[in-house]
Amino acid sequence: MKRNQLARRLTALAAAVCMMVCTAGSLAAGSAFAEIDVPDVDVETGFVVVSGALTAKKETGVTLMVFVPGTNVSGILQTTDVLEEKLYYTDTVQSFEDGVFEIEFDMTKGPDGVEGETGAYPFILACGDIKTGTIDYTNRNDVLDVLRAIAAVESPEALQEMFTKDVAVKLGMNGDLADDAQKTLTGAAAEKIYGAIVNADPAIDGEDLASANRIARLFEQPAAFALLQSTKDAAKLQEYIGNYNHYYQFAMGDGSNYAKINLAANRTIVYQALAAEGNFADVQTARASFEKAALVGYINDITASGTMQEVLRREAATLGIDFTAYDALSDTKRVRVINDLMKLTMPTAAEIAAQFAAKVQEYAAGTDDDDKITTTPPQGGGGHGGGSGSGGGGSWTGIPTNPGAGTGTGSGTGTGSGTGTENTQVFYDLAGSEWAQEPILALYYRGVVNGKESGVFDPESSVTRAEFVKMIVNALEITADAGSVAFDDVAQGDWFYDVVRTAAACGIVNGTGSGFSPNANITREDMAVIIVRAAQYAGVSLDGGTGAAFTDAAAISDYAAEAVGKMQANGIVNGMEDGSFQPQQNATRAQACKMLYELLKK
């Protein structure tokens, strides 16, 4: 085709695209492109494939326009006056029925068949919506110049000196990787990486474009692993893995232990564990090391005791944990071991195993009193053991500060005598909530609830939806293979992310519209619904109760009526003194503990 004919076609097509762009609105308009992939140009053949998918699953036209380096694409989008000399390549293809499209073309063929210069070629991809980007291309003569220079190098040291970021980019390679390797690798590591190219058999042919791909195979993955082997610095490992994981292929995607970590601090632990225990001798060993380190980070991130126990047991061999002594403990002592571990920061697998063994040994050495909530006088009375006492200022409910430390005897006069560790009160603000003292302390003892500060439980304050979900997931030790959360107000990094994700996966919570409203106070009727769903999931039978016999039963929402009825029929909730349930009233911390405690007794 003659140049003027081709130019007219290209200009007409460009003008049509510009008109389409004007109709669409602006650079940011629409969302027709679901994804776009622009791989590197194949240095040997000069071909590149621009591909992607549209949000609309149908056949439609997709236009690609590639411009010469230095073209201001934004300026072109504002006018239909497209200069033909700026357009390097254009084509329109029809997407497939599923919205997927591919546009393959030869970068060595410009508008008049002449290969373009080395540089970044801006492009516009249009389909009602538009996307822009660049294609990096190196003229084949420039590639051959680089290959000739590499072929002439006689030593690994000389090649490392000349193998800069710019050289790597011209060969279609990762320039940042080449830069890091040039600046970091020394000694035997550098000798091995660069020597593989210098001493290649057969030797690198400076006149063959295929040599570029061969150099990439000899250099890129070995250099990436050499960088891992070159450091024990956690921050550097994090940097290298973040930049070059397409070479390592460490498990970091959806469903992996790494992806389950919500807190940035616990992701940092992954790289600390990798620095301390990682082995990068070969690809398989490196991947196993990363997976173990990711497991360490995930364990530090877990907030539900049931999930913690499940993960530790499943990964016992990897972590070096022996469950024999743990399984011999009482239920309460096992819960205490797990809850104590969740309060610690454990930067390595060895530390997790050591802390687990230490906690098991600590509680195994305790007495049976470790499993009890006791009621003793605040003054007088004996220590733990065979002592007894009464009087001395009235009774109160407390938990031993150092369970099992003493073997005491006591008299019944209220003054008490003997040796041992005295019970001390946990919360000092339960006066007026005596009806909830036992439930509060029982759940505290199991690690389900904590105080707001030392000695303060604040029983009459409201409970948020996120707080209650955490309470019930931990109380029933609910676990699930949970995916991502569909609620738009629950994000990775939120302290409640893991428990809400678990509860949603189990059908325990449905949310409020498109969100979950985690920080909203939970009502008494919503709490009843969640409890009944959780009980059903956990296999706790709650029979009977088709409707609630409260004085304000008519005020209970339709969706909650059956749940409230089941709660009443099974003695989990009794209502207020006046016989009402007050369904829309915000639930208090004391009420939440009482209901959970009664459920756990079933």
Image (cartoon, rainbow, N blue to C red):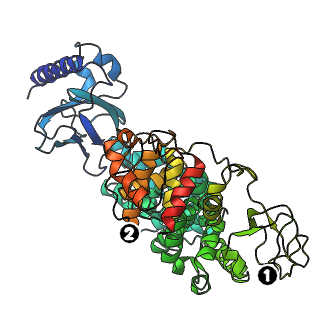
Pointer 2 residue: 539
Report the side of 439 relative to 63 (left or right): right
Horizontal and vertical percent position of residue 521: 51, 40
Horizontal and vertical percent position of residue 50: 24, 42
Bin the neighbour count of mark 2 within 10 Å (Cα to Cα): few under 14, some 14-19, many 20 and up. Answer: few
Report the side of 184 relative to 95 (left or right): right
Residue 128 occupies quadrant: top left
Vertical placement of 429 versus 582: above or below? below
Vertical placement of 205 versus 25: above or below? below
Horizontal and vertical percent position of residue 581: 46, 45
Horizontal and vertical percent position of residue 109: 21, 37
**Which kind of residue does numbered mark 1 sit on?**
Gly
Q: Is residue 194 visible?
A: no
Q: Nearer the viewer, residue 21 or 195?
A: 21
Identify the element where label 2 is drawn: loop
Residue at image coords 56%, 72%: 279
Q: Nearer the viewer, residue 36 or 543?
A: 543
Identify the mark at residue 385; answer none if there is no mark. 1
Report the side of 30 relative to 98 (left or right): right
Vertical placement of 87 versus 524: above or below? above
Q: Nearer the viewer, residue 537 or 271?
A: 537
